Image: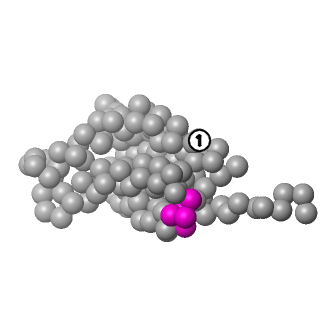
Amino acid sequence: MRKYIKHIAVVIFLLSFLLPAYRPDREAYSGWECLKFCLGTLNGDSVRGGWRFYYFGFFITNLLFLFTWLIPSIKERFRLKCACVSLIPLAHVISWFVINFWDRERQGRLLVDYGYYTWLSAFVLLSASLFITKNENHGA
């Protein structure tokens, strides 16, 4: 069961990059465009100060998602460690909603779109799947 949940999480994760994730105005930005923006924050002038690292952290968060999906598939003994590590990117992804929720009064609405919620659900599913233990006594 855990394996299927992990695979579903990866499909949802990849799908989220095609969907509109952020809508600051009439134009929506896909998850892929958001990822490119976050990757470019370290060498660009679009974001200043500590926010550069916060946005670049989303690039790292996406890499951690892939690693926490792949590593337990190769070595089962690392599953619990990956489960604990998966909570860090999950908290980072949730922080984006919290920041936008508090900023909604200035904008008059939430700026996150359904691609963000799809992306978030992938992180939740992956983290949950890593904490599920195998039940060896199926019939007992």
Q: How is the image coloured?
A: one colour
Residue at 17% across / 45% down in the picture?
Answer: 40
Q: Return the x and y of residue 34 as percentages of the image width and height.
A: 30, 41
Q: Name the residue nearer the viewer: 6 or 94.
A: 6
- Left or right? Give the position of 132 relative to 72: right
Q: Name the residue nearer the viewer: 130 or 62.
A: 130
- The answer to which quarter of the image holds residue 91 is bottom left
Is residue 58 something that shows in the picture?
no
Q: Return the x and y of residue 117 as percentages of the image width and height.
A: 49, 46
Task: State how many labels appear.
Answer: 1
| Magenta stretch secondary structure, dominant | helix
Q: Is residue 66 above or below residue 87?
A: above
Q: Is residue 78 magenta?
A: yes
Residue at 12% across / 57% down in the picture?
Answer: 48
Is residue 31 something that shows in the picture?
yes
Q: Residue furthest right?
A: 140
Residue at 51% across / 64% down in the picture?
Answer: 78
Q: Name the residue nearer the viewer: 44 or 134.
A: 134
Which secondary structure lies at badge 1?
helix
- The answer to which quarter of the image holds residue 61 is bottom left
Q: Is residue 79 above or below residue 66?
A: below
Q: Quadrant of the C terminus?
A: bottom right
Q: Is residue 6 above or below residue 20?
A: below
Q: Is residue 6 magenta?
A: no
Amino acid type assigned to the residue bearing label 1 in the image: Ile
Q: Return the x and y of residue 32 as percentages of the image width and height.
A: 33, 36
The residue tagged 1 is 8
Residue at 64% across / 44% down in the picture?
Answer: 4
Q: Name the residue nearer the viewer: 51 or 102.
A: 51
Which range is magenta?
A: 76-80
Q: Characterize the local packing of mark 1: few (<14), some (14-19) or many (20 or more) Cα atoms within 10 angstroms.
A: some
